[in-house]
Image (tube, helix red, strand yellow):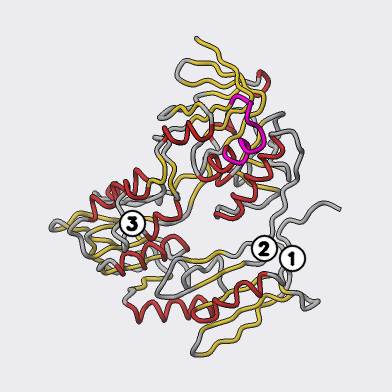
Amino acid sequence: MTHSNYDVVIVGSGLGAYTLAREFRKLDKEATLLMITRDDGVFYSKPMLSNALAGNKTAEQLVMKPVEKMREELAAEIWTETDVTELQPADHSLHCNGTEIGYRQLVLALGARPRQLPLQGDAADQVISVNDLVAYREFRERLEGQRRVAIMGPGLVGCEFANDLLRSGHEVQVIGPDAYPLSTLLPEEAGRRMQQVLEEKGFHWYLQRTVERIDTQNGAFALQLSDGEPLQADFVLSAVGLAPNLDLARAAGLEVNRGIEVDRHLATSAADIYALGDCAEVAGLWLPYVMPIMNAARALARTLAGESTELVYPPMPVVVKTPDFPLVVCPPAPDAVGQWQIEQDEAGLRALFMDAEETLRGFVLTEDKVKEKQSLTKQLPNVLDSSP
């Protein structure tokens, strides 16, 4: 077994990992840096996956930079298609490909994987989820020539994919147990409005029910819903959420909850190990969105470079990529106490979440009202503030 030592090792090559590496290199040009990834290491924008189809973007066209360019720009070793098989925090080492690697500081940017539903039927294994470039490539190939698409999951990603598929000429059927779309992010009035507007545009909603089985039938798929209703589709896409990749951290004895537990410095329960991105739960918050990841990567880069930096989350509105129903969501914190104040007219809906002191804590804007995003964002307190 060979042995190598590095100042910083990053496990992962997604948005969080590459943003961290880039920000770290701005601060420290000399440290030895190793990145280990189970995929091919190309740099691309994962959020683009859910709206690339209508633009007829192939997987290759979504690649921003090949791994060779990333190695050069980051002055880093990048090991591709490599799994980390063991992590030993007490020894400051990890194992992969028969190599023991020593680190001074380690960052776990392990991402998350699509949740899998327990489906019955002989075609249950034909369901596809799209959470990386490889899966997007397969999605494009298998979608060729198919018209009717059933999408399991009326949440953020499911609705984005459905709108993209609709705009690229497909018939979309969106299925889920929720009473209305984006039910975990929107007040009911906003969700109902979204449902109605997108239905008028061509969405077929099958809400308050789930898919129980999928079977092949005459070259297509027969879906049986929980209320017994049959549904036909040529293609089935699952977008029922993400599960953080915790296996490596859990096996190494790190504290995990919904994600790998980290403090405001992104530090795990083990010395010199940090976690970032979709796998990390920061001070009790799991926010698998672009802006939280970018803010965390910048703060962690400074910490790794020797300037201990506490993460601050500013207000971070999410622009939902449903062009047939423009939508911006800035949800209140999970522990926020207050109520929604909702106004709507022909131009759209404005929902403001106000606390007892009439302080704005979150908002939802639809259609023409989305232009108010900037002015409302300025009124919001930080999601995570600096310590007093």
How far across and how far down the image is residue 175, in percent? 37, 66
How far across and how far down the image is residue 66, in percent? 39, 38
Instruction: Look at the picture and state if 62 lies above or below 380.
Output: above
Report which residue position mark 3 lands on.
237
Secondary structure at badge 3 equals strand
Secondary structure at badge 1 equals loop
Alpha-carbon distance for marks 3 and 2?
32 Å
Label 3, residues with CA under 10 Å away: few <14, some 14-19, many ≥20: many
Residue 224: quadrant of the picture: bottom left
Query: What's the residue at 50%, 68% (across, down)?
Result: 182
Instruction: Look at the picture and state if 230 lies above or below 83.
Output: below
Left or right, 13 with reference to 342: left
Instruction: Look at the picture and state if 350 lies above or below 290.
Output: below
Secondary structure at badge 2 equals loop
Numbered disc in front, either 3 or 2 = 2
How far across and how far down the image is residue 190, in percent? 53, 78
Report which residue position mark 2 lands on.
315
Residue that sits furthest to the top in the current view: 1
**First along the sequence among labels 2 and 1:** 2
Report which residue position mark 1 lands on.
381
Residue 213: quadrant of the picture: bottom left
**First along the sequence among labels 3 and 1:** 3
Query: In terms of depth relative to the viewer, which is nearer, 226 or 175?
Result: 175
Numbered disc in front, either 3 or 1 = 1
Amino acid type of the residue that numbered disc 1 sits on in the rendered structure: Pro
Label 2, residues with CA under 10 Å away: few <14, some 14-19, many ≥20: many
Residues drawn in magenta = 22-32
Residue that sits furthest to the bottom in the current view: 346
Alpha-carbon distance for marks 3 and 1?
37 Å
Query: What's the residue at 67%, 41% (across, down)?
Result: 300
